[in-house]
Image: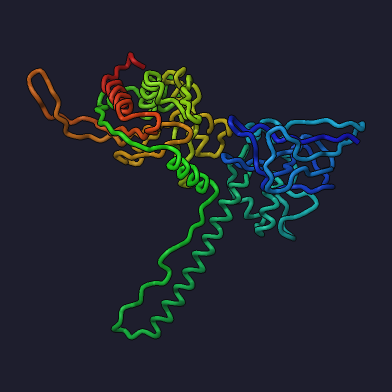
């Protein structure tokens, strides 16, 4: 018999370890190639580590809750063959979500030698062992599983899909129970309260909603940023009438030529990258008592998710892209972020973050710096306002498209003068916009 070591795969830039949250197999289990062996978690994403071969689990080298380093063996598999030891590294975990389902797997039933709920029809839809185990524990039937719309490759149901389904089902049950209890209370009160007295205030005046894992990570990241950086914010008004008019006149032709929608976000992002190259200290970080100036502008784009959480995918080397390339990258990352299809290395390595508040009609804000960066720019909603304009014949009042830019920055590195210079230069760039500048 030969022994194969399963190594913890690389999971993106800056990720050196992962926590084993759950073993999906035990010693002695017979496993197949691509079968998930363990569920792992980093501070970015949750993933599964699949087997690289057919065989029998020989040894689990770490316990649940341990955090092995990338490249360490986490378990060993006995396979048929000569008595020698070999090692296989699972592919970079960032590629796992994009692996096609093997042909022989796609046609297998979701259950082998076991059923989720007794005496129910077995579906032919492929579901991973992790999802099967959770479904069994929660008492979810085959029919209920079939109704879940999967967000994985080829519509495959992921752990997050099942977790959301369980939460929604629990919420529905809790709501029904709460309504029934409230009705009983109201009936009891009505029967004991004289007609001339008002009804008492409902005792069910609030609801406790536990944070999900992503919200906990966001909370920890935000608190750590406030504890690390000396936050200061500066603001400036910008007349973006020229940009708004140009975009309205050219958005249809742009989409026809490049196949991507053109938004004000793309135009603001391009101008921001240009100004960052002029003020390199804005694109830096701190290590101890040293300031690290970054040569590449890796632009993080804050993106709101359907569940209310926030994620920041990163456009790598944004300074090398023209407007069409920047628009394509931002649109692609935003779409896959909302579909939960981002790779771990697409949400790491950012050097400066950009957030557009205008989609929610927010005039301005003071966003928290995304560590270890030193600044974050917020673009407020574009609104028509009466503005005093200077002309050769005197001042006039005109209707112009105005927005407010706000820059939150780390006062340990950036002073108010530099922040003001950066914002003024960015304003001048936007207000003097011409199509030959793009």
* Residue 309 x, y percent position in the rendering: 47, 45
Q: Residue at x 54, y 31 (%)?
A: 346
Quarter of the figure with residue 16: top right
Residue 346, visible in the rendered structure? yes
Above-or-below relation of 44 to 322? below
Q: Residue at x 72, y 38 (%)?
A: 50
* Residue 306 x, y percent position in the rendering: 47, 44
Left or right of 14? Residue 289 is left
Q: Quadrant of the C terminus?
A: top left
Above-or-below relation of 106 to 255? below
Q: Residue at x 34, y 15 (%)?
A: 437
Q: Residue furthest front?
A: 289
Quarter of the figure with residue 302: top left
Left or right of 136? Residue 421 is left
Residue 253, visible in the rendered structure? no
Q: Residue at x 40, y 81 (%)?
A: 189
Quarter of the figure with residue 71: top right
């Amino acid at each position: 018999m030969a022994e194969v070591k399963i190594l913890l795969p690389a999971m993106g830039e800056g990720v050196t370890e992962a926590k084993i949250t759950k073993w999906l197999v035990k010693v002695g289990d017979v496993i197949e190639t691509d079968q998930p062996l363990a569920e792992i978690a980093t501070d970015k994403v949750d993933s599964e580590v699949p087997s690289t071969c057919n065989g029998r689990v020989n040894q689990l080298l770490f316990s649940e809750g341990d955090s092995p380093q990338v490249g360490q063996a986490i378990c060993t598999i006995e396979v048929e063959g000569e008595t020698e030891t070999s090692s296989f590294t699972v592919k970079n975990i960032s590629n796992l979500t994009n692996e096609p389902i093997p042909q022989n797997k796609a046609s297998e039933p979701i259950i082998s030698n076991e059923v989720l709920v007794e005496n129910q029809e077995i579906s032919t839809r492929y579901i991973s062992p992790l999802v099967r185990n959770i479904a069994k524990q929660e008492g979810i039937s085959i029919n209920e599983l079939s109704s879940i719309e999967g967000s994985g490759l080829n519509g495959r149901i992921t752990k997050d899909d099942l977790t959301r389904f369980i939460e929604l089902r629990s919420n529905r049950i809790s709501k029904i129970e709460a309504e029934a209890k409230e009705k009983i209370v109201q009936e009891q009160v009505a029967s004991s309260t004289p007609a001339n007295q008002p009804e008492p205030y409902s005792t069910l005046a609030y609801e406790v909603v536990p944070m999900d894992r992503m919200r906990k990570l966001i909370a920890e990241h935000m608190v750590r940023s406030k504890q690390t950086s000396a936050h200061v914010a500066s603001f400036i008004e910008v007349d973006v009438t020229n940009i708004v008019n140009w975009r309205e006149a050219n958005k249809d032709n742009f989409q026809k030529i490049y196949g991507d929608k053109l938004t004000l976000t793309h135009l603001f992002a391009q101008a921001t990258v240009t100004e960052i190259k002029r003020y390199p200290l804005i694109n830096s970080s701190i290590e101890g008592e040293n300031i690290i100036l970054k040569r590449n502008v890796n632009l993080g784009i804050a993106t709101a998710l359907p569940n209310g959480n926030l994620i920041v995918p990163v456009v790598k080397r944004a300074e090398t892209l023209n407007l069409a390339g920047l628009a394509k990258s931002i649109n692609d990352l935003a779409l896959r972020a909302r579909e939960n299809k981002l790779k771990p290395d697409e949400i790491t390595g950012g050097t400066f973050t950009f957030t557009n508040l205008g989609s929610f009609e927010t005039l301005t804000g003071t966003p928290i710096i995304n560590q270890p960066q030193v600044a974050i720019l917020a673009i407020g909603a574009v609104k028509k306002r009466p503005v005093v304009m200077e002309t050769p014949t005197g001042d006039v009042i005109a209707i112009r498209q105005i927005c407010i830019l706000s820059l939150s920055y780390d006062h340990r590195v950036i002073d108010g003068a530099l922040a003001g210079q950066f914002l003024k230069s960015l304003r001048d760039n936007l207000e003097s916009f011409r199509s030959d500048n793009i």
